[in-house]
Amino acid sequence: MADAQPVLDLIDAFRRSKAMFAAVSLGIFDRLEGAPAGGADLAAEKGCDRDALERLLDTCVALGLLEHASDGYRNLPVASHYLRLASPRTLTGYILYSDRVLYPLWEHLEDAVREGTHRWEQTFWRKMGVFDELFSSEENKLTFLAGMHGMGLLSSPAVIAALDLSRFRHLCDLGGATGHLAIEACRQYPALRATVFDLPGVTAQARRFIEQAGLESHIEVRDGDFFADPLPEADLYALWRIIHDWSESKITALLAKIYDRLPAEGGLLLAERILYPLKDGPLGAQLQSLNMLVVTEGKERTAAQYETLLRRAGFREFHARVTGRPLDAMLGVK
């Protein structure tokens, strides 16, 4: 008889993630960082039913996020690092976005598979897209950017280290968000200069993180839309989780624009999740591709598919490296 455990694990999978989402949304990990607390005190502070909250807290213990202490519940290091809004490595922005936006969108995965289109209008009853939601309020924008910065800190060091970038002198990160990729590139290549190019509503956060890193003399920040505006001068452009958002026609136009702006021997660095050649893994990349289906007009690709896109745009060299981190690295050279 086949082992039923994989199926049972999948039945429970959404319950595990939703338990973490709820604890983050309630601010449990932020509260416990200051001092341990018992269930009664936490329930009174959070306006929750004590028995119900203790069930959630005990589940977080079983999930390896909290521990029982003599004076109540206490954060474990993983919660202190990634599940608190105040942590410099926080992932809470992406968690809250997953809870409030992705979770409802995924309810309609079957319809997305039938029709091959995202689910914004079906889910939220209005025409919108991912960036409309992310920038719908200052709080939403700042929370999401903080979460993406945390995701960047997990991947950018490995992406920059994966390929030899020593030939390049000026990196321009298009849609560079908080500047984490440019910061890491300048740390690993001290002679490199960089530009973070993003929408006006985003660049203030890039300036803040660059100042915190002490790299204002190495990295400039410029406002702009990489689809609509002229690109800053550079001999290396970067697209971090950009290609997977868009349709092939938009990707083709953007790659052509970058290629035309690059000097001879200039490069394009891509940071994306690479699918295996037969698209039979890794699971994280496959799930992200389904996420792109319900959220955007894009998808994840194999290294060969990315190479086809870049060579079609004119790039003559292509290198791909799997990093073992959430994002992989690819380089095309003009």
Image (tube, rainbow, N blue to C red):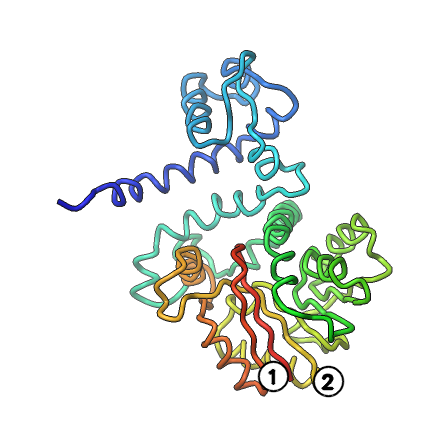
Q: Where is residue 266 in the image (x, y as percent from the top left)?
A: 70, 80
Residue drawn at (34%, 54%) of the image? 108
Q: Which amino acid does label 1 sit on?
A: Ala
- Mark 2 lies on a secondary structure that is loop
Residue drawn at (58%, 65%) of the image? 271
- Residue named by callout 2: 263
Residue furthest left in the image: 1
Q: Where is residue 90 in the image (x, y as percent from the top left)?
A: 62, 42
Q: Can residue 119 be seen in this view?
A: no
Q: Where is residue 292 in the image (x, y as percent from the top left)?
A: 45, 62
Q: Nearer the viewer, residue 3 or 135?
A: 3
79 up-or-down from 226: above or below = above
Determine crowd level at label 2: few under 14, some 14-19, many 20+ residues with C-alpha closer than 10 A: some
Q: Is residue 93 visible?
A: yes
Quarter of the image for the C terminus: give it. bottom right
Quarter of the image for the N terminus: give it. top left
Which quarter of the figure has residue 15? top left
Q: Distance between the residues labelled 1 and 2?
A: 13 Å
In this rendering, position of residue 213 left or right of residue 12: right
**Of the two numbered discs 1 and 2 in the rendering, the one whose residue sits closer to the viewer:** 2
Residue drawn at (61%, 61%) of the image? 159
Q: What residue type is labelled 2?
A: Pro
Residue drawn at (62%, 71%) of the image? 269
304 up-or-down from 215: above or below = below
Q: Nearer the viewer, residue 121 or 228?
A: 228
- Residue named by callout 1: 256
